[in-house]
Image: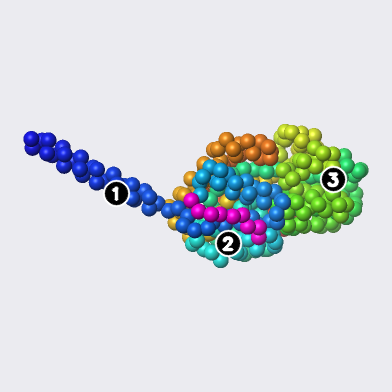
Amino acid sequence: MKKYFKINKLCVFLGLLLPLNGVVWAQDWKPERHVELIVPASAGGSLDNVGRTFHRLWDELKLMPVSSAVVNRAGGGHAIAYNFLNQHAGDPHFLSITSSTLHTSNINGRIKLSYRDFTPLAVMMTEYIAIAVRPDSPLKTGKDLIESLRKDPGGLSLALSSALGGTHHISLGMPLLSGKVDIKKTRMVAFNSTGEAVTALLGGHVDVLSGGTVQIAPHVASGKMRLLAVSAAHRLPGALASGPTWPELGYKGVFENWRGVIGTKDMTAPQVAYWDHVFGTIARSDQFKTLAQKNQWEINYKNSAETRKFLEGEYMELKEVMDFLGLSK
Protein backbone atom coordinates (compact mmCIF):
# COMPACT_ATOMS: atom_id res chain seq x y z
CA MET A 1 0.00 0.00 0.00
CA LYS A 2 2.85 2.35 0.95
CA LYS A 3 4.61 1.45 -2.28
CA TYR A 4 1.46 2.25 -4.26
CA PHE A 5 1.15 5.56 -2.46
CA LYS A 6 4.78 6.47 -3.30
CA ILE A 7 4.23 5.67 -6.97
CA ASN A 8 1.12 7.82 -7.02
CA LYS A 9 3.05 10.68 -5.40
CA LEU A 10 5.75 10.33 -8.06
CA CYS A 11 3.14 10.40 -10.84
CA VAL A 12 1.54 13.49 -9.37
CA PHE A 13 4.96 15.16 -9.10
CA LEU A 14 5.83 14.35 -12.72
CA GLY A 15 2.38 15.46 -13.78
CA LEU A 16 3.03 18.83 -12.20
CA LEU A 17 6.43 19.12 -13.85
CA LEU A 18 5.17 18.53 -17.37
CA PRO A 19 2.89 21.59 -17.45
CA LEU A 20 5.68 23.64 -15.87
CA ASN A 21 8.08 22.52 -18.60
CA GLY A 22 5.47 23.44 -21.15
CA VAL A 23 5.23 26.91 -19.67
CA VAL A 24 9.00 27.33 -19.75
CA TRP A 25 9.08 26.24 -23.41
CA ALA A 26 6.25 28.60 -24.27
CA GLN A 27 8.27 31.43 -22.78
CA ASP A 28 11.10 30.96 -25.33
CA TRP A 29 11.22 34.13 -27.43
CA LYS A 30 9.08 34.69 -30.50
CA PRO A 31 8.05 37.93 -32.26
CA GLU A 32 5.58 39.95 -30.23
CA ARG A 33 4.66 42.60 -32.80
CA HIS A 34 5.01 43.48 -36.49
CA VAL A 35 8.27 42.33 -38.14
CA GLU A 36 10.01 44.42 -40.79
CA LEU A 37 12.30 42.72 -43.32
CA ILE A 38 14.43 45.44 -44.91
CA VAL A 39 15.72 45.21 -48.47
CA PRO A 40 18.71 47.56 -48.93
CA ALA A 41 17.87 48.12 -52.61
CA SER A 42 14.95 49.36 -54.68
CA ALA A 43 12.02 47.19 -55.77
CA GLY A 44 12.54 44.88 -58.74
CA GLY A 45 16.19 44.06 -58.17
CA SER A 46 17.88 40.82 -57.14
CA LEU A 47 17.99 41.65 -53.42
CA ASP A 48 14.32 42.60 -53.53
CA ASN A 49 13.52 39.24 -55.11
CA VAL A 50 15.43 37.47 -52.34
CA GLY A 51 13.68 39.41 -49.57
CA ARG A 52 10.22 38.83 -50.98
CA THR A 53 11.01 35.13 -51.43
CA PHE A 54 11.92 34.74 -47.74
CA HIS A 55 8.86 36.71 -46.70
CA ARG A 56 6.53 34.63 -48.85
CA LEU A 57 8.01 31.36 -47.59
CA TRP A 58 7.80 32.16 -43.89
CA ASP A 59 4.13 32.94 -44.54
CA GLU A 60 3.53 29.76 -46.53
CA LEU A 61 5.33 27.63 -43.95
CA LYS A 62 3.46 29.39 -41.12
CA LEU A 63 6.66 30.36 -39.31
CA MET A 64 5.57 33.85 -38.23
CA PRO A 65 3.05 34.39 -35.40
CA VAL A 66 2.67 38.12 -36.15
CA SER A 67 2.22 40.37 -39.18
CA SER A 68 5.27 41.23 -41.28
CA ALA A 69 6.27 43.19 -44.35
CA VAL A 70 9.14 43.78 -46.77
CA VAL A 71 10.32 47.40 -46.80
CA ASN A 72 12.72 48.75 -49.45
CA ARG A 73 15.28 51.20 -48.05
CA ALA A 74 17.58 51.83 -51.01
CA GLY A 75 20.52 54.13 -51.47
CA GLY A 76 24.07 54.92 -50.45
CA GLY A 77 25.53 51.50 -51.18
CA HIS A 78 23.10 50.02 -48.60
CA ALA A 79 23.98 52.79 -46.13
CA ILE A 80 20.37 53.94 -45.70
CA ALA A 81 19.18 50.44 -44.82
CA TYR A 82 22.04 49.62 -42.46
CA ASN A 83 21.90 52.97 -40.69
CA PHE A 84 18.17 52.45 -40.15
CA LEU A 85 18.77 48.96 -38.78
CA ASN A 86 21.49 50.27 -36.48
CA GLN A 87 19.03 52.77 -34.97
CA HIS A 88 16.94 49.83 -33.67
CA ALA A 89 19.71 48.01 -31.79
CA GLY A 90 18.36 45.34 -29.48
CA ASP A 91 15.03 45.04 -31.30
CA PRO A 92 14.73 41.59 -32.96
CA HIS A 93 11.66 42.67 -34.95
CA PHE A 94 13.88 44.39 -37.54
CA LEU A 95 15.96 42.32 -39.99
CA SER A 96 17.72 43.11 -43.25
CA ILE A 97 18.70 41.21 -46.34
CA THR A 98 22.45 41.52 -46.77
CA SER A 99 25.31 40.58 -49.09
CA SER A 100 29.02 41.21 -49.52
CA THR A 101 28.13 44.89 -49.94
CA LEU A 102 27.96 44.96 -46.13
CA HIS A 103 31.72 44.47 -46.25
CA THR A 104 32.61 46.48 -49.32
CA SER A 105 30.71 49.62 -48.28
CA ASN A 106 32.60 49.59 -45.00
CA ILE A 107 36.00 48.86 -46.56
CA ASN A 108 35.61 51.62 -49.17
CA GLY A 109 34.52 54.12 -46.52
CA ARG A 110 30.96 54.57 -47.74
CA ILE A 111 29.54 53.58 -44.34
CA LYS A 112 31.15 53.32 -40.90
CA LEU A 113 29.07 50.29 -39.93
CA SER A 114 30.36 46.76 -40.47
CA TYR A 115 29.14 43.23 -39.78
CA ARG A 116 30.38 43.70 -36.21
CA ASP A 117 27.58 46.24 -35.62
CA PHE A 118 24.85 43.70 -36.32
CA THR A 119 23.82 40.17 -35.42
CA PRO A 120 24.62 37.75 -38.27
CA LEU A 121 21.63 35.42 -38.70
CA ALA A 122 22.00 33.42 -41.91
CA VAL A 123 23.67 32.94 -45.26
CA MET A 124 21.07 31.37 -47.53
CA MET A 125 22.42 31.05 -51.05
CA THR A 126 24.69 32.39 -53.78
CA GLU A 127 23.47 34.33 -56.79
CA TYR A 128 26.10 34.77 -59.44
CA ILE A 129 26.71 37.94 -61.45
CA ALA A 130 26.24 38.07 -65.20
CA ILE A 131 27.67 40.48 -67.79
CA ALA A 132 25.28 41.28 -70.63
CA VAL A 133 24.75 43.62 -73.58
CA ARG A 134 21.94 44.38 -76.01
CA PRO A 135 21.72 41.98 -79.00
CA ASP A 136 22.84 44.71 -81.42
CA SER A 137 26.14 45.17 -79.54
CA PRO A 138 29.32 44.30 -81.46
CA LEU A 139 30.54 42.47 -78.34
CA LYS A 140 29.99 38.70 -78.60
CA THR A 141 31.78 37.37 -75.49
CA GLY A 142 33.53 38.63 -72.37
CA LYS A 143 36.82 38.39 -74.23
CA ASP A 144 35.59 40.98 -76.75
CA LEU A 145 34.66 43.23 -73.82
CA ILE A 146 38.10 42.95 -72.21
CA GLU A 147 39.95 43.53 -75.48
CA SER A 148 37.78 46.56 -76.31
CA LEU A 149 38.37 48.13 -72.90
CA ARG A 150 42.07 47.34 -72.98
CA LYS A 151 42.40 49.38 -76.18
CA ASP A 152 39.98 52.13 -75.11
CA PRO A 153 39.08 51.98 -71.36
CA GLY A 154 36.57 54.81 -71.64
CA GLY A 155 34.95 53.63 -74.85
CA LEU A 156 32.02 51.83 -73.20
CA SER A 157 29.71 52.75 -70.33
CA LEU A 158 29.49 49.96 -67.75
CA ALA A 159 26.37 49.68 -65.58
CA LEU A 160 26.84 48.37 -62.03
CA SER A 161 23.85 47.08 -60.06
CA SER A 162 25.26 48.47 -56.81
CA ALA A 163 27.41 51.35 -55.65
CA LEU A 164 30.96 51.99 -56.85
CA GLY A 165 33.25 49.82 -54.78
CA GLY A 166 30.43 47.32 -54.24
CA THR A 167 30.13 43.66 -55.17
CA HIS A 168 29.28 44.23 -58.83
CA HIS A 169 32.20 46.63 -59.16
CA ILE A 170 34.61 44.10 -57.66
CA SER A 171 33.17 41.24 -59.69
CA LEU A 172 33.67 43.15 -62.94
CA GLY A 173 36.98 44.61 -61.76
CA MET A 174 38.56 41.16 -61.34
CA PRO A 175 38.52 40.19 -65.07
CA LEU A 176 39.34 43.78 -66.10
CA LEU A 177 42.39 43.70 -63.86
CA SER A 178 43.29 40.22 -65.12
CA GLY A 179 42.99 41.50 -68.70
CA LYS A 180 45.26 44.49 -67.95
CA VAL A 181 42.53 47.10 -68.46
CA ASP A 182 43.25 50.53 -66.97
CA ILE A 183 40.37 50.48 -64.49
CA LYS A 184 40.82 54.12 -63.49
CA LYS A 185 39.91 55.23 -67.01
CA THR A 186 36.76 53.10 -67.38
CA ARG A 187 33.28 54.67 -67.28
CA MET A 188 31.27 52.90 -64.60
CA VAL A 189 27.72 53.96 -63.74
CA ALA A 190 26.23 52.80 -60.41
CA PHE A 191 22.54 52.01 -59.89
CA ASN A 192 20.55 51.12 -56.76
CA SER A 193 19.48 47.70 -58.06
CA THR A 194 19.78 45.28 -60.96
CA GLY A 195 16.25 46.27 -61.99
CA GLU A 196 17.30 49.88 -62.55
CA ALA A 197 20.45 48.83 -64.39
CA VAL A 198 18.46 46.49 -66.65
CA THR A 199 16.14 49.36 -67.59
CA ALA A 200 19.14 51.53 -68.43
CA LEU A 201 20.70 48.87 -70.66
CA LEU A 202 17.48 48.07 -72.53
CA GLY A 203 16.83 51.78 -72.98
CA GLY A 204 20.22 52.30 -74.62
CA HIS A 205 21.58 54.52 -71.82
CA VAL A 206 24.54 52.22 -71.04
CA ASP A 207 26.51 49.73 -73.14
CA VAL A 208 27.25 46.87 -70.72
CA LEU A 209 25.44 45.54 -67.66
CA SER A 210 26.83 43.78 -64.58
CA GLY A 211 23.84 42.39 -62.68
CA GLY A 212 22.19 39.52 -60.83
CA THR A 213 21.48 36.43 -62.92
CA VAL A 214 17.80 36.18 -61.94
CA GLN A 215 16.98 39.56 -63.53
CA ILE A 216 19.14 39.00 -66.61
CA ALA A 217 18.08 35.42 -67.45
CA PRO A 218 14.56 36.27 -68.76
CA HIS A 219 15.95 38.92 -71.09
CA VAL A 220 18.58 36.52 -72.41
CA ALA A 221 15.88 33.90 -72.97
CA SER A 222 13.67 36.40 -74.85
CA GLY A 223 16.55 37.61 -77.03
CA LYS A 224 16.61 41.13 -75.58
CA MET A 225 20.12 40.62 -74.17
CA ARG A 226 23.27 38.75 -75.09
CA LEU A 227 25.23 37.11 -72.31
CA LEU A 228 29.00 37.78 -72.33
CA ALA A 229 30.17 35.98 -69.17
CA VAL A 230 29.17 34.81 -65.68
CA SER A 231 31.05 35.02 -62.38
CA ALA A 232 30.53 31.31 -61.56
CA ALA A 233 33.26 28.68 -61.57
CA HIS A 234 31.09 26.54 -63.87
CA ARG A 235 28.52 27.16 -66.59
CA LEU A 236 25.04 27.91 -65.29
CA PRO A 237 21.97 25.93 -66.42
CA GLY A 238 18.91 27.08 -68.31
CA ALA A 239 18.77 30.41 -70.10
CA LEU A 240 22.30 31.33 -69.00
CA ALA A 241 23.96 28.15 -70.31
CA SER A 242 25.28 30.16 -73.28
CA GLY A 243 27.39 32.35 -71.01
CA PRO A 244 31.02 31.29 -70.60
CA THR A 245 32.77 31.66 -67.26
CA TRP A 246 35.61 34.15 -66.94
CA PRO A 247 38.18 31.34 -66.46
CA GLU A 248 36.94 29.77 -69.71
CA LEU A 249 37.85 33.01 -71.44
CA GLY A 250 41.25 33.14 -69.79
CA TYR A 251 40.57 35.69 -67.03
CA LYS A 252 40.11 35.72 -63.28
CA GLY A 253 36.57 36.51 -62.22
CA VAL A 254 34.94 33.82 -60.07
CA PHE A 255 32.87 35.70 -57.50
CA GLU A 256 30.17 34.31 -55.21
CA ASN A 257 27.51 36.95 -54.63
CA TRP A 258 25.94 35.41 -51.52
CA ARG A 259 22.66 36.53 -49.96
CA GLY A 260 21.91 36.42 -46.24
CA VAL A 261 20.16 38.06 -43.31
CA ILE A 262 21.35 40.21 -40.41
CA GLY A 263 19.54 41.44 -37.32
CA THR A 264 20.10 44.32 -34.96
CA LYS A 265 23.00 44.41 -32.55
CA ASP A 266 22.69 42.84 -29.07
CA MET A 267 20.02 40.26 -29.87
CA THR A 268 19.66 37.65 -27.13
CA ALA A 269 20.40 33.93 -27.55
CA PRO A 270 16.67 32.94 -27.54
CA GLN A 271 15.97 35.60 -30.21
CA VAL A 272 18.81 34.34 -32.40
CA ALA A 273 17.60 30.77 -31.87
CA TYR A 274 14.14 31.73 -33.11
CA TRP A 275 15.49 33.18 -36.34
CA ASP A 276 17.83 30.19 -36.74
CA HIS A 277 14.72 28.03 -36.72
CA VAL A 278 12.91 30.23 -39.26
CA PHE A 279 15.71 30.45 -41.82
CA GLY A 280 16.87 26.88 -41.29
CA THR A 281 13.32 25.68 -41.98
CA ILE A 282 13.13 27.81 -45.12
CA ALA A 283 16.51 26.56 -46.38
CA ARG A 284 15.48 22.92 -45.94
CA SER A 285 12.02 23.32 -47.48
CA ASP A 286 11.08 21.87 -50.86
CA GLN A 287 9.57 25.23 -51.79
CA PHE A 288 12.91 26.99 -51.39
CA LYS A 289 14.74 24.29 -53.33
CA THR A 290 12.28 24.70 -56.21
CA LEU A 291 12.67 28.49 -56.22
CA ALA A 292 16.45 28.19 -56.02
CA GLN A 293 16.46 26.04 -59.13
CA LYS A 294 14.16 28.48 -60.93
CA ASN A 295 16.29 31.51 -59.98
CA GLN A 296 19.61 29.71 -60.53
CA TRP A 297 20.60 30.14 -56.89
CA GLU A 298 23.01 27.76 -55.20
CA ILE A 299 21.80 26.98 -51.67
CA ASN A 300 24.65 27.27 -49.17
CA TYR A 301 22.79 27.74 -45.89
CA LYS A 302 24.74 28.72 -42.77
CA ASN A 303 23.16 29.26 -39.36
CA SER A 304 23.91 32.29 -37.18
CA ALA A 305 27.12 30.92 -35.62
CA GLU A 306 28.45 29.71 -38.98
CA THR A 307 27.49 33.01 -40.61
CA ARG A 308 29.46 35.01 -38.06
CA LYS A 309 32.61 32.97 -38.77
CA PHE A 310 32.00 33.24 -42.52
CA LEU A 311 31.66 37.04 -42.36
CA GLU A 312 34.85 37.37 -40.35
CA GLY A 313 36.82 35.41 -42.94
CA GLU A 314 35.31 37.04 -46.00
CA TYR A 315 35.85 40.54 -44.67
CA MET A 316 39.60 39.97 -44.58
CA GLU A 317 39.63 38.39 -48.06
CA LEU A 318 37.66 41.26 -49.61
CA LYS A 319 39.80 43.87 -47.93
CA GLU A 320 42.89 42.31 -49.47
CA VAL A 321 41.31 42.40 -52.96
CA MET A 322 40.00 45.94 -52.53
CA ASP A 323 43.38 47.15 -51.26
CA PHE A 324 44.88 45.75 -54.46
CA LEU A 325 42.23 47.42 -56.64
CA GLY A 326 42.70 50.74 -54.86
CA LEU A 327 39.11 50.72 -53.53
CA SER A 328 39.90 50.76 -49.80
CA LYS A 329 39.76 53.83 -47.60
Q: Nearer the viewer, residue 319 or 264?
A: 264
Q: Which residue is mark 1?
A: 20
Q: Which residue is mark 3?
A: 133
Q: Nearer the viewer, residue 259 or 21?
A: 21
Label 2 CA crowd tier, 10 Å (few <14, some 14–19, many 20+): many
The N terminus: image quadrant? top left
The earlier-in-sequence mark between 1 and 3 is 1
What is the distance, in whole Å, between disc 2 and disc 3 at their CAs?
Answer: 36 Å
What is the distance, in whole Å, between disc 2 and disc 1 at their CAs?
Answer: 37 Å
Q: Position of residue 131 (x, y in %)?
A: 79, 45
Task: Name the amino acid, label 2.
Answer: Leu
Q: Position of residue 213 (x, y in %)?
A: 73, 43
Q: Which residues, given as a range, are shown in magenta?
A: 65-73
Q: Is residue 176 above or below residue 89?
A: above
Helix, strand or loop status at disc 1: helix
Helix, strand or loop status at disc 2: helix
Circles 2 and 1, Cβ within 8 Å, touching? The answer is no
Displayed quadrant of residue 186: bottom right
Q: Is residue 290 above or below residue 264?
A: above
Q: Is residue 66 magenta?
A: yes
Q: Is residue 227 visible?
A: no
Displayed quadrant of residue 133: top right
Task: Name the amino acid, label 1.
Answer: Leu
Helix, strand or loop status at disc 3: strand
Give the residue at x 68% y 40%: 295
Q: Which residue is mark 2?
A: 85
Position of 300 compared to 185: left or right?
Answer: left
